[in-house]
Image: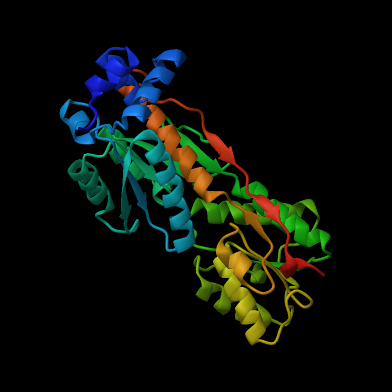
């Protein structure tokens, strides 16, 4: 016979309401009582009934992850990080890919939240950086957490997880400069991502700090794709004043640049140094392996989910939903053979 909330309460010697508070992670239960209830749940192998919790008038225990990003490695790491936190806190996850440029994107997201009865939404770039979407969610009273590029969250009333792309990009460019490079090209991803702009800003800041003139012909725009790396490196190598190093906006672009350089008969790193960003499997599967900035995407996603759940718990208690300070992650420089002289 399956355990019930009543049998858990009797086993732990507490009220049913106390067990309910523990199950819902309300944070108002004393530590010794919390341990008693958790031990009872484990001993009886009690599984909370999510449907029953919903019918009782509580928020649905389902979160939504909404994204528009073609990088499969990034999305997989995001999903894994979110799922880890959801499972730990008794939530389910609905994954919703979309086109951020669609004229009906706001209606699509609002309809999805309503039909799935989502408790809250996790937004990653570029959706997390689109004011119209945020305003629409605010107007409907939908709680969300934003994952975005930046050094601080200005003017936000929702939990936010920041990635300091600027500092990491500065570190990569500085590493190339200290390797003796003075002509460093930059291959960008889509400009709709603030991460692109922040990485470019870090690159330019490092050049300025070390008194190196910017070669605008060596700053190329593209997409976060392998194909961009292949295409743009050919453009750079066709120029009379070839760069001696390339900073690509992510590892996928960098891997494409490495492939394209080889197709042109250029050796990496003796003739051309190449660095990427994110420390995705692309950076470790190339030969030589790529210098990059290690971005803990799964950890970022897990922190974002924890912050959203904290806001939801506060709302259930009738408290402030604007809980939890912004968390900042700084990707760390990882030096590999692609930039070694």
Residue 338, image x, y percentages: 72, 69
Query: Does residue 100 lie above or below 329 as drawn?
Result: below
View extreme (left): residue? 55
Location of residue 23 by image quarter: top left
Residue 186, image x, y percentages: 64, 65
Asked if one can make out residue 316 in the rendered structure from this viewpoint, the answer is yes
Query: Does residue 71 lie above or below 2 as drawn?
Result: below
Q: Nearer the viewer, residue 82 or 230?
A: 82
Q: Nearer the viewer, residue 253 or 335?
A: 335
Q: Nearer the viewer, residue 67 or 334?
A: 334
Q: What residue do we see at 54% from left, 52% from top? A: 195
Location of residue 40 by image quarter: top left
Q: Is residue 244 left or right of residue 33?
A: right
Asked if one can make out residue 125 in the rendered structure from this viewpoint, the answer is no
Q: Is residue 117 left or right of residue 228?
A: left
Residue 31, image x, y percentages: 46, 15
Q: Is residue 9 left or right of residue 123?
A: left
Residue 323, image x, y percentages: 43, 25
């Amino acid at each position: 016979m399956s355990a019930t909330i009543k049998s858990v309460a009797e086993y732990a010697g507490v009220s049913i309401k106390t067990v309910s508070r523990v199950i819902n992670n309300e944070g108002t239960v004393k530590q010794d009582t919390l341990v008693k209830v958790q031990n009872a749940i484990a001993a009886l192998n009690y599984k909370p009934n999510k449907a029953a919790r919903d019918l009782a008038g509580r928020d649905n225990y389902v979160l939504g992850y909404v994204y528009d990003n073609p990088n499969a490695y990034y999305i997989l790491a995001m999903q894994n990080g979110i799922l880890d936190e959801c499972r730990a806190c008794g939530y389910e996850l609905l994954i919703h890919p979309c086109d951020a440029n669609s004229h009906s994107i706001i209606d699509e997201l609002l309809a999805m939240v309503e039909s799935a009865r989502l408790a809250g939404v996790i937004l990653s770039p570029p959706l997390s950086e689109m004011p119209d979407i945020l305003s629409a969610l605010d107007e409907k009273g939908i709680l969300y957490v934003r994952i975005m590029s930046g050094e601080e969250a200005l003017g936000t009333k929702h939990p936010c997880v920041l990635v300091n792309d600027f500092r990491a990009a500065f570190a990569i460019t500085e590493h190339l400069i200290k390797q003796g490079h003075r002509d460093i090209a930059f291959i960008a991803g889509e400009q709709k991502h603030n991460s692109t702009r922040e990485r470019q800003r870090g690159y330019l800041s490092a050049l300025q700090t070390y008194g190196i003139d910017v070669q605008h012909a060596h700053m190329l725009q593209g997409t976060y794709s392998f194909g961009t790396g292949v295409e743009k490196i050919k453009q750079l190598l066709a120029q009379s004043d070839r760069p001696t190093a390339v900073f690509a906006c992510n590892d996928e672009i960098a891997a494409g640049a490495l492939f394209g350089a080889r197709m042109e008969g250029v050796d990496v790193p003796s003739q051309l140094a190449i660095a990427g960003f994110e420390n995705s499997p692309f950076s470790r599967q190339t030969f030589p392996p790529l210098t990059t900035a290690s971005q803990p995407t799964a950890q970022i996603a897990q922190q974002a989910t924890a912050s959203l759940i904290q806001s939801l718990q506060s709302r259930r208690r009738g408290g402030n939903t604007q809980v939890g300070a912004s968390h900042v992650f700084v990707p760390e420089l990882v030096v590999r053979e692609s930039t070694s002289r």
